[in-house]
Amino acid sequence: MNNMNLDEVREFIRNCSETTCVYIGADSERYRGKDELWYADYTLAVVVHYDGARGCKVFGSVSTERDFDQRKDKPAYRLMNEVYKAAQLYMDLAESIGERHAEVHLDINPDIIHGSSCVVQQAIGYIRGTCNVVPRVKPEAFAASYAADRMKELLATAGV
């Protein structure tokens, strides 16, 4: 659907002060296609918070892939795909982030009444091992729960 220009994001981050914070979030939405197969739209967001105190700029992208989860109430495949995409985005931006404060936010709810809890430990472990940061999950994961969640709609509205 829409690809984020990573060079533009890297340049933007590099031109910000060292007190700027970077938040990376991922979200997905499952739906049945016209061919009766299941698909998921994966949305990534990078929130660059100027000096950690002033406004922010948000970059985003949306991609569509087949979803092979067998159970809608335990979407492990789709959720771990979100985690892999967030980790890759963090790694792609790590050099530009440098010593700035950075967080990876996952749209996963640790409360066992929610289906996303089925991958919470696996997801946290993957981000810690791959990115060397402790990810935030709901309710502290605003870059996933709000920024990435809305990004798909905003990009569609903008005709991007």
Image (cartoon, rainbow, N blue to C red):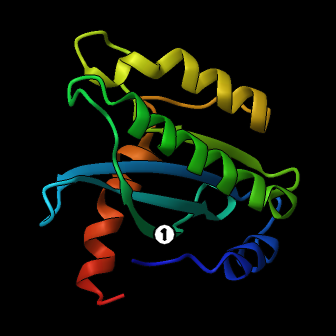
Looking at the image, residue 8 sits to the left or right of residue 108; the answer is: right
Find residue 139 and report its image quarter.
top left
Would you call the spot at circle 1 few (<14 residues within 10 Å), some (14-19), or many (20 or more)? many
Which residue occupies 87% across, 55% down? 98
Q: Nearer the viewer, residue 120 or 12?
A: 120
Amino acid type, callout 1: Gly
Judging depth in this view, the residue of 47 and 56 nearest the camera is 47
54 is higher (above) or lower (below) than 26: below
Where is residue 99 drawn, in percent x and y? 87, 50
Left of 90 or right of it: where is 132? right
Relative to the observer, which residue lies in front, 23 or 32?
32
Q: Is residue 79 left or right of residue 131?
A: left
Looking at the image, is 121 positioned above or below residue 34? Answer: above
Secondary element under disc 1, as helix, strand or loop, is: strand
Q: Is residue 122 left or right of residue 96?
A: left
Residue at x-position 55% and y-position 60%: 47
Give the residue number, with chain letter if any, for mark 1: 60
| Viewport quadrant of the N terminus | bottom left
Which residue: 33% across, 78% down?
A: 155
